[in-house]
Image (tube, rainbow, N blue to C red):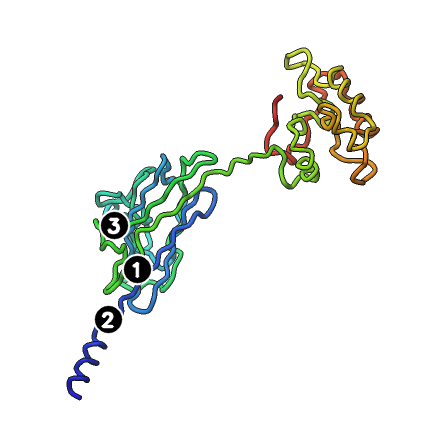
Amino acid sequence: MKRMMAILVLVVAVPAMAVVNFTATDAGSQKLTIAYTTTDGDLPRGVAIRISLSDGAMLDFAAPVVVDAAFNTFIDWAYSNPLNYQVGNGNPLALATAAGALTADAADFSISMGVLDQTGKQLAGPASATLITIQLKGIADGGQTTVTCTGDTLRGPASGVVGSVLTSNLPQTVVVKGKVVPTDCVKTTASFYNDWVAFGKPNCWCYERQCNGDIDGKKFPNSAAGKPVTTADLTIFKAAFNLTTADLALVANGICADLNHAKFPNTATGKRVTTADLTTFKLYFNVAMASVPSCDISNYNFWMIP
């Protein structure tokens, strides 16, 4: 019985091994967010995480940093600004391989912060927190950077967490993407997007003045003041005028003469190039470029050039 009691005492005396689970996520617009949750046991009193960015990406030092309010102590900022230090001042961005606050854009840097009360007493942080959101830069449009998060052993343990008995799931990686580059010239929000897809995504619908008669996307003469709607466009328009949708498919570039991107009557076999298109075509035929408006750019991601 005494032996059993001794074993129970020993088991109770061993503290629970708290695990801090970090998550790094792409927050959009080249922003990186790092958060954590913990299991039963001790709570973090501070974190020290090393961040590395690939493919030429960098932290945008000039951009605002959003930090969980509980983490109000920035040791490296205090180190670099000893005369101005008080709880809450500064930010957690630190040099990667030396003591001190970060002062410029960087591809390798650290996040170091803790929890203190106003008297300087160390406190426990929350059981879960969105630690920080930071702005990255230098990610190519359509490209990405791999973000690697590891424990910063210059400032703390390999777990990246300061506390009594704490482990973590570091290292962690996440891909942060640059600006998404659209591949379709017509926006999915355009009223005629589905028709554009059904007709095989014709480039001509994305010519800057196609909606006003520039069927071939060219101007004559080839100068800034040239006329975009000419006899070349007229030839295509005449061949496509008043045909059913099925017959229109047999005319080379015939769908390009559908200036308003609508059919009449509103049926599957309706005619695409009608008097409504003719009215527009006549208005801008043989008119100088400056007097032929561009189409509504809100329907397009970019213009196509023939």
Q: Say what amino acid the circle numbered 1 marks.
A: Val
Residue 27: x percent and y percent? 45, 48
Of circles 3 and 1, the one toward us is 3
Q: Earlier in the sequence, mark 2 or mark 1?
A: 2
Q: Earlier in the sequence, mark 2 or mark 3?
A: 2
- Disc 3 marks which residue? 152
| Mark 2 and mark 1 residues within 8 Å of each other at the beta carbon | no
Q: Earlier in the sequence, mark 3 or mark 1?
A: 1
- Disc 2 marks which residue? 15
Residue shown at 73% from the left, 28% from the top: 255
Placement of the N terminus among the 4 image quadrants: bottom left
Check the image and name the residue furthest to the bottom: 1
Residue 283: x percent and y percent? 79, 22
The answer for how far apart the CA atoms under marks 2 and 3 are is: 24 Å
SS for dot 2? loop
Instruction: Mark 3: give few (<14), some (14-19) or many (20+) Cα within 10 Å.
Output: many
Residue 273: x percent and y percent? 79, 29
Q: Say what amino acid the circle numbered 2 marks.
A: Pro
| Mark 2 and mark 3 residues within 8 Å of each other at the beta carbon | no
The quadrant holding residue 122 is bottom left
Q: Nearer the viewer, residue 197 or 213?
A: 197
Tell me the tag on residue 115: 1
